[in-house]
Amino acid sequence: MLFISNTVSIPDDEIDISYIRAQGAGGQNVNKVSSAVHLRFDINASSLPDFYKERLLALKDSRITKEGVVVIKGQQFRTQEKNRDDALSRLQEMIKSVGIVQKARRATKPTKSSQRKRVDSKTLRGKTKSMRGKVSI
């Protein structure tokens, strides 16, 4: 069971985990041990609330396929257990991130005094620069 929040969780049977050989350097060990994890999670077939499903499918993430399947590959560690935990935590973070609703930003206007200060500083700067010109006798 993967817990997302107090009310939302994903049963283990909805997450498909398979073990594959890791890429990269590692000597003999990398050729004979399948320590990397290939995690697949179908968003549409899951028991997630519709709010989470819609937001996940709207994400512009390369880990989500056109069919709505999240594919996460974990091969950072040397053991299957650590790679599995890493992949599950990355899935959990992805789903948690869509659950956070950003507060709408309201545009504000500058105050009258700040506008006045800005104009006054510009005119003062202009006067200073005008004094740097050639002196006429």
Image (tube, rainbow, N blue to C red):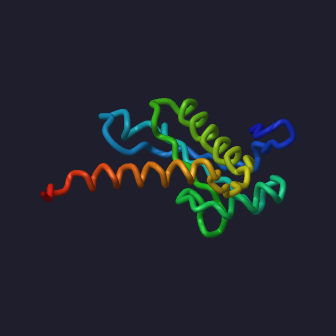
| Outermost residue toward the left in this view | 137
Is 1 displayed left or right of 65 in the figure? right
Query: Residue 32: x, y in percent?
Result: 40, 38
Please name the residue shown 46% across and 32% down the image: 77
Residue 49 placement: quadrant: bottom right
- Point out residue 129 in the picture as x, y percentages from the top left corner: 27, 53
Q: Is residue 120 left or right of residue 132?
A: right
Q: Residue at x 67, y 49 (%)?
A: 16
Of all residues, the one furthest to the bottom in this rendering is 66
| Residue positioned 72% across, 59% down in the render | 55
Q: Residue 133: x, y in percent?
A: 19, 56
Image mark count? 0
As drawn, the residue found furthest toward the right would be 7
Q: Which residue lies most toward the front here?
A: 137
Q: Is residue 86 left or right of residue 77?
A: right
Q: Is residue 52 or residue 85 the one in the foreground?
A: 52
Residue 53 place in picture, x, y as percent? 76, 59
Please name whichever residue, 25 or 21, is drawn nearer the observer in this view of the structure.
25
- The image quadrant where one finds the N terminus is top right
Name which quarter of the figure residue 81 lies in. Answer: top right
From the image, which quarter does the C terminus lie in? bottom left
Asked if 128 appears above or below 57 in the picture, the reply is above
Residue name at image x 37 percent, y 40 percent: 31
**Image quarter for residue 88?**
top right
Of residue 44 and residue 121, the one placed in the foreground of this image is: 121
